[in-house]
């Protein structure tokens, strides 16, 4: 399964078969942690932890996650760079897991931190912000099906309401040079499926990204979307960079400028 197939097929998995990951799967996921990278800086520590369900210890996810033995734990700084990097780096591991046939589910809210945190020491300035089960999917429970319906998890906002060309009155055409990486961004997971990202394509080289701030998690969501965008660019042989533009077109009232991407030589 290639990267674009993984992006299109991935969905959050909340029901697992209860089996232990194999040593090879664990080693591959640990490699994925080490190989993940981000251009946004900040501070982030990612660990993979096994909980022995036979000993009866089940960390609390308020009933959201069933049958998972392994969880990633993500501790990060409280700044915006750390949030962007959390999304950008960890989504690389989520996609890798899906390519290995394993499900995951980003969890920012529905977990009891002290259950997951109790034997962990994190680097100075970092606290546990995200947990994420990983394992083989089991048939979805009624709770999982209801959660997906309530969040409208299978739906995404339409392309022409998220992406624009030259100004914010002109929706981006689907044959634009950036249409494919932006479509992959559009499919990204986000907390409560909030999809905070917006983009304005300037020309054949440069895109400005904006976002709607919905919660503290919105920047993590943006990092996840940028991961899909950037991986797709690389997949198609484009090697651009993210940068802060000096001046960008003023966005609609509740959008904030975040960052730009260009393949134009400096
Ligand atoms: C940063 C982030 C935090 C999330 N937090 C939770 C959570 O606390 N509980 C939960 O059940 N799902 C959580 N989700 C999963 C989203 O609800 C899910 O990604 C979204 O509904 C889209 O569905 P999909 O991932 O199946 O495409 C989170 C997702 C992201 C990206």
Image (cartoon, rainbow, N blue to C red):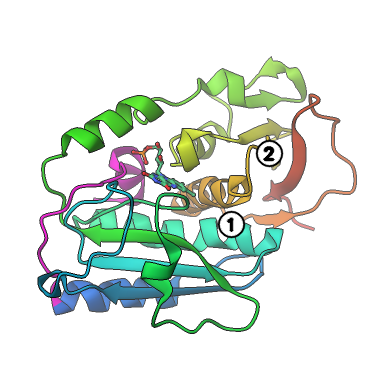
Q: Decide: is 150 above or below 11.
A: above
How many marks do you count on the picture?
Answer: 2
Horizontal side of residue 111 vs 190, given as left or right: left
**Residue identified by numbered label 1:** 239
Q: Is residue 213 or residue 259 the one in the foreground?
A: 213
Mark sitting earlier along the chain (1/2): 2
Mark 1 surroundings within 10 Å by alpha-carbon count, few (fewer than 14), some (14 through 19), many (20 or more): few
The picture quadrant where one finds residue 43 is: bottom right
| Image quarter (top left, top right, bottom left or bottom right) of the C terminus | bottom right
Residue 213 is labelled as: 2
Residues in magenta, as a range: 1-22
Horizontal side of residue 63 vs 84, given as left or right: left
The percent position of residue 194, horizontal first and vertical second, equals 53, 33
Residue at left offset 33%, top offset 74%:
48
The percent position of residue 23, horizontal first and vertical second, equals 16, 79
User: Is residue 165 covered in magenta?
Assistant: no
The percent position of residue 131, horizontal first and vertical second, equals 40, 61
Q: Identify the element where label 2 is drawn.
A: loop
Q: Depth-wise, is mark 1 or mark 2 nearer the camera?
A: 2
Ligand 1 falls in which quarter? top left
């Amino acid at each position: 399964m290639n990267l674009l197939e993984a992006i299109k097929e991935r969905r959050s998995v909340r029901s697992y078969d209860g089996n232990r990951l194999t040593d090879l799967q664990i080693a591959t996921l640990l490699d994925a942690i080490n190989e993940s990278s981000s251009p946004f800086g900040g501070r982030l520590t990612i660990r993979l932890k096994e909980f022995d369900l036979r000993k009866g210890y089940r960390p609390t996810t308020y009933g959201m996650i069933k049958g998972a033995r392994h969880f990633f734990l993500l501790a990060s700084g409280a700044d915006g760079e750390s949030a962007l990097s959390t999304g950008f780096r960890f989504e690389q591991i989520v996609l890798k897991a899906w390519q290995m046939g394993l499900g995951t589910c980003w969890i920012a809210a529905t977990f009891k931190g002290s259950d997951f945190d109790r034997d962990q020491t994190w680097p100075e300035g970092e606290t546990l912000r995200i947990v994420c089960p990983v394992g083989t999917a089991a048939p979805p429970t009624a709770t999982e099906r209801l959660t997906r319906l309530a969040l409208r998890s299978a739906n995404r906002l339409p392309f022409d309401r998220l992406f624009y060309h030259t100004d914010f009155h002109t929706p981006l055409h689907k044959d634009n040079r950036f249409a494919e990486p932006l479509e992959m961004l559009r499919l990204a997971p986000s907390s409560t499926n909030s999809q905070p990202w917006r983009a304005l394509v300037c020309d054949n080289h440069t895109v400005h990204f904006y976002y709607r701030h919905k919660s503290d998690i919105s920047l993590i969501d943006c990092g996840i979307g940028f991961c899909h965008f950037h991986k797709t660019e690389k997949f198609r042989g484009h090697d651009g960079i993210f940068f802060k533009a000096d001046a960008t077109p003023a966005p609609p009232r509740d959008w904030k400028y975040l960052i730009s991407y260009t393949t134009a030589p400096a």
